[in-house]
């Protein structure tokens, strides 16, 4: 489990991240300048969380508490992954190394790390992070810079890539696991209500997402508790 | 937005995200025992992404029509087994096609 093995395994993730963060850069450059968008990617390394964060910080009514709560719930899954990954790492992967490398716990890097047959060493995990980190940061930079140059018809088209990726994560799970289908439909119905029901439309975007996800996930957990083998595929 | 506000927002966002990853990674060695909370956490990523995508995707492009077409095309592409990048490409091409055609008309 050498550093170089990790770098090699991380290549496809890095390429995918470049493409997706390109669209984040475009979306962001419409709201804030390119160095600021790029710096978000360099310090966060999340997709959905950054996207919601960008919406909150560019919303005139957005607040810090809303940012903290939205980030907490959207990125809460990383805590689950961190718990799961902590069971999988080599004994030499100590506290200091964990503090240094925790930022690398993303959906894809996590999935690749835990699918290894051997215990994951800090060297390997660090290698695994390198190209995705570079891909995510440089993709955002390119997207943000190009977003200011490219015609609107092209940036609009590229800006939808992030939603495409979200759909590609949700749909297969909805297809494979009926309770997820139900939970997702509840979340969508709730989200539509916040947008179109006049009495609810004063709620800010960030809180609407949190409430939708909380309601749908709590109902899902109450009525369709998952079995252990079902969790492992998430 | 002021630069000061940007950095404060960034500090909150990056700080919360880092703590969510680092604290359980460093502290927790055992498994969460409550089946209810394990289930809740298992549903969270999907419900969050769904709530973020619908209806926002309809307003992310030039027209609601191209956004709606991208949504449908991406769901179909995903049902046919395309991966992350493939589905994203399908969504982009759909928007480019629909907005391009409506510009010409």
Image: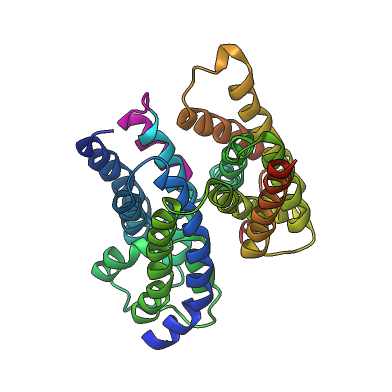
Residue closer to the observer: A180 or A32: A32
**A190 above or below B4?**
above
Quadrant position of residue A53: top left
The total of numbered circles placed on residues is: 0
Q: Residue at x 59, y 23 (%)?
A: A194
**B4 above or below A62?**
below
As drawn, the residue found furthest toward the front would be: B104
**A85 above or below B57?**
below
Q: Quadrant of the N terminus of chain A?
A: bottom left
Whether B87 is among the magenta residues is no
Q: Residue at x 66, y 44 (%)?
A: A225
Quadrant position of residue B21: bottom left
Residue closer to the observer: B99 or B32: B99
Residue closer to the observer: A225 or B45: B45
Q: Residue at x 42, y 42 (%)?
A: A30
Quadrant position of residue B60: top right
Camera sees residue A227: no
* Percent x, y of residue A31: 39, 40
Camera sees residue A151: yes
**A198 above or below B92?**
above
* Percent x, y of residue A27: 47, 46
As drawn, the residue found furthest toward the top would be: A199
* Percent x, y of residue B43: 60, 45
As drawn, the residue found furthest toward the left would be: B4
Residue closer to the observer: B29 or B81: B81
* Secondary structure that dominates the magenta span: helix
Q: How is the image coloured?
A: rainbow
* Percent x, y of residue B63: 65, 36
Whether A71 is among the magenta residues is yes
Q: Quadrant of the C terminus of chain A?
A: bottom right
Residue segment shown in magenta = A60-74
């Amino acid at each position: 489990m050498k550093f170089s093995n990790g770098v090699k395994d991380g290549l496809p993730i890095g390429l995918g991240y470049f493409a997706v963060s390109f669209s984040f850069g475009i979306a962001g450059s419409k709201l804030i300048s390119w160095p600021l968008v790029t710096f978000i990617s360099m310090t966060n390394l999340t997709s959905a969380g950054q996207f919601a964060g960008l919406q909150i910080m560019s919303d005139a009514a957005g607040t810090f508490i809303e940012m903290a709560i939205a980030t907490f719930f959207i990125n809460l899954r990383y805590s689950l992954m961190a718990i799961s990954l902590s069971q999988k790492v080599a004994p030499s992967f100590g506290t200091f190394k964990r503090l240094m490398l925790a930022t690398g716990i993303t959906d894809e890097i996590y999935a690749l790390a835990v699918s290894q047959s051997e215990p994951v060493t800090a060297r390997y995990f660090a290698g695994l992070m390198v190209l995705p980190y570079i891909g995510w940061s440089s993709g955002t930079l390119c997207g943000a810079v190009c977003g200011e140059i490219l015609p609107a018809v092209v940036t609009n088209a590229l800006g939808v890539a992030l939603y495409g990726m979200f759909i590609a994560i949700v749909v297969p799970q909805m297809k494979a696991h009926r309770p997820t289908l139900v939970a997702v439909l509840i979340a969508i119905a709730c989200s539509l209500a916040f947008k179109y029901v006049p009495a609810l439309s004063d709620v800010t975007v960030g809180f609407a997402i949190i409430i939708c996800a909380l309601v749908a996930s709590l109902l899902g957990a109450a009525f369709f508790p998952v079995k252990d083998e079902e969790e492992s595929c998430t | 937005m002021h630069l000061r506000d940007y950095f404060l927002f960034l500090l909150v966002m990056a700080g919360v995200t880092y703590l969510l990853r680092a604290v359980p990674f460093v502290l927790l060695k055992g498994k969460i025992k409550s089946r209810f909370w394990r289930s809740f956490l298992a549903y969270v990523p999907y419900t969050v992404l769904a709530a973020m995508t619908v209806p926002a995707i309809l307003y992310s492009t030039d027209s609601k029509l191209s956004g709606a077409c991208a949504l449908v095309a991406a769901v179909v592409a995903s049902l046919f087994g395309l991966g992350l990048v493939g589905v994203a490409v399908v969504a982009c091409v759909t928007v480019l096609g629909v907005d391009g055609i409506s510009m010409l008309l």
